[in-house]
């Protein structure tokens, strides 16, 4: 369509402005690819052109993989959504919650520790209502301080270290009381490992990536594929600082269900199409239709949103932001659409009403620009919907 051709021109112009080195974008409607382009450079230092089979660090676009993996175990009858997390990770029992108290006389905030009113559940992990946060993003000053002190993180820790350290720090919210994006999906990965007795990467390969023929998606990019890895600019065009992204060419200390994987646009489109098709693709069924409907429904209701990452007009399901109404958000879209993105410039959205899957892949320093780049492309795709 002429409108999708316009998207190509705009992306080329953005690349020429130095916004990002290159992009791969894929749009499918009614199960058929309507647009698939590789533009700009895959590696600006080497001058290598972008190719459709370029591999990108997916960061938080790993979360939907881990979420689907958990639902596979639910369908297997091995876990339940209302199970306490401590059933599988006993160290996370009897956690405390850090509660801020403002003293109007002194103007100071003090923090009191109170027991968790209930245990966090598997559902809390899937919808980010566990009270676990990201130390780097949370506005809860005391929890931020304690995460740093105890070395709580998503990478550079073994699975055992990760859970041991989390057991030492309080939650930022009572479980089920607030939506705050954070380490919930990483802990979900640890639950999956505890239940299956294998690594998250191996479980995903056997139950998700192999059946869907996602041959280029993994937690480790093998030597033979390293040349296909997208590279950012050496220096961030905004700050001038050197850009260091996750090294997906070396084994990490844990398979991070929140951020650790890498893959291609075509692979991710197959994953997204499986969800749009109600849990199956090319005659291979992964999930039941009702399971996908449950995952892609809003699970927050009137739960308070305590993190600015959730866009206006969206709730959150079991692994995805879910659009609750056609209006309110500045971006055109349908109620029922679900989406997520990754910090280094990747995004996807799935629109059941329009029978549409969109995958957007760039690679750059995490920051506000990545969202702006994605939203501009999204605006152009939405404008091209005609029939």
Image: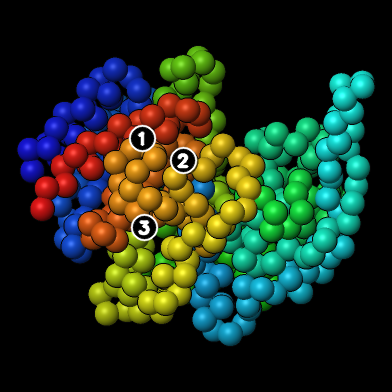
The residue shown at (17%, 34%) is 8
- Which quadrant of the structure image shows residue 330? top left
The secondary structure type at the circle numbered 3 is loop
Q: Is residue 195 visible?
A: yes
Residue receiving disc 2: 312
The residue shown at (54%, 30%) is 244
Q: Is residue 382 left or right of residue 200?
A: left
Residue receiving disc 1: 330
Q: Is residue 270 visible?
A: no
Q: Does the CB distance between marks 2 and 3 fall below 8 Å?
A: no
286 or 139, nearer to the observer: 139
Q: Does the CB distance between marks 1 and 2 fall below 8 Å?
A: yes
Percent from the top left, x then y, of residue 356?
A: 25, 56
- Which quadrant of the structure image shows residue 257? bottom right
Q: Is residue 248 left or right of residue 14?
A: right
Please tell me which of labels 1 and 3 falls first in the chain.
Answer: 1
Percent from the top left, x then y, of residue 135?
A: 71, 39
Q: Is residue 52 left or right of residue 219?
A: left
Residue receiving disc 3: 336
Disc 1 from disc 3: Cα separation: 16 Å
Please tell me which of labels 2 and 3 falls first in the chain.
Answer: 2
Q: Residues within 10 Å of mark 3 (few under 14, many from 20)?
A: many
Q: Residues within 10 Å of mark 1 (few under 14, many from 20)?
A: few
As drawn, the residue found furthest toward the bottom would be: 77
The answer to whether 220 is drawn above or below residue 12 in the figure is below
165 or 255, nearer to the observer: 165
Q: Residues within 10 Å of mark 2 (few under 14, many from 20)?
A: some
Disc 1 from disc 2: Cα separation: 8 Å
The answer to whether 279 is drawn above or below residue 140 in the figure is below
Please tell me which of labels 1 and 2 falls first in the chain.
Answer: 2
The residue shown at (50%, 52%) is 315
């Amino acid at each position: 369509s002429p409108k999708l051709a316009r998207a190509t021109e705009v992306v080329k112009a953005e690349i020429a402005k130095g916004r990002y080195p290159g992009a791969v974008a894929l749009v499918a409607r009614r199960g058929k690819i309507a647009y698939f382009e590789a533009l700009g450079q895959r590696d600006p230092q080497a001058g290598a052109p972008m190719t459709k089979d370029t591999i990108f660090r997916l960061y938080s676009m790993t979360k939907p993989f881990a979420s689907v993996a958990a639902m596979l175990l639910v369908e297997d009858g091995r876990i339940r959504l209302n199970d306490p997390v401590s059933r599988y990770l006993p160290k996370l029992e009897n956690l405390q919650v850090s509660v801020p108290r403002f003293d109007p006389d002194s103007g100071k905030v003090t923090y009191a520790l109170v027991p968790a009113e209930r245990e966090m559940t598997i559902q809390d992990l899937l919808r980010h209502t566990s009270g676990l946060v990201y130390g780097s993003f949370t506005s809860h000053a005391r929890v931020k301080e304690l995460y740093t002190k105890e070395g709580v993180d998503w990478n550079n820790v073994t699975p055992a270290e990760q859970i041991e350290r989390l057991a030492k720090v309080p939650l930022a919210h009572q479980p089920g009381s607030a939506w705050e994006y954070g380490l919930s999906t990483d802990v979900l990965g640890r639950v999956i490992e505890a239940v299956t007795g294998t690594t998250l990467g191996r479980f995903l390969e056997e139950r998700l990536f192999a059946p869907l023929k996602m041959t280029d998606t993994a937690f480790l990019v093998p030597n033979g594929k390293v040349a296909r890895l997208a590279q950012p600019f050496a220096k961030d065009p905004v700050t001038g600082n050197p850009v260091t992204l996750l090294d997906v060419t070396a084994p990490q200390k844990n398979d991070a269900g929140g951020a650790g994987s890498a893959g291609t646009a075509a692979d991710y489109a197959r994953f997204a199409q499986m969800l749009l098709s109600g849990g199956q693709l090319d005659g291979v069924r992964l999930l039941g239709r009702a399971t996908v409907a449950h995952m892609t429904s809003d699970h927050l209701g009137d739960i308070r949103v305590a993190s600015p990452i959730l866009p206006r007009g969206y709730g959150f399901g079991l692994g995805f932001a879910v659009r609750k109404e056609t209006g309110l958000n500045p971006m055109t879209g349908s109620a029922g659409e679900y989406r997520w993105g990754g910090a280094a410039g990747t995004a996807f959205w799935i629109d059941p009403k329009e029978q549409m899957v969109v995958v957007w892949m760039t690679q750059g320093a995490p920051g506000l620009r990545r969202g702006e780049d994605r939203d501009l492309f999204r605006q152009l795709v939405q404008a091209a919907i005609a029939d």
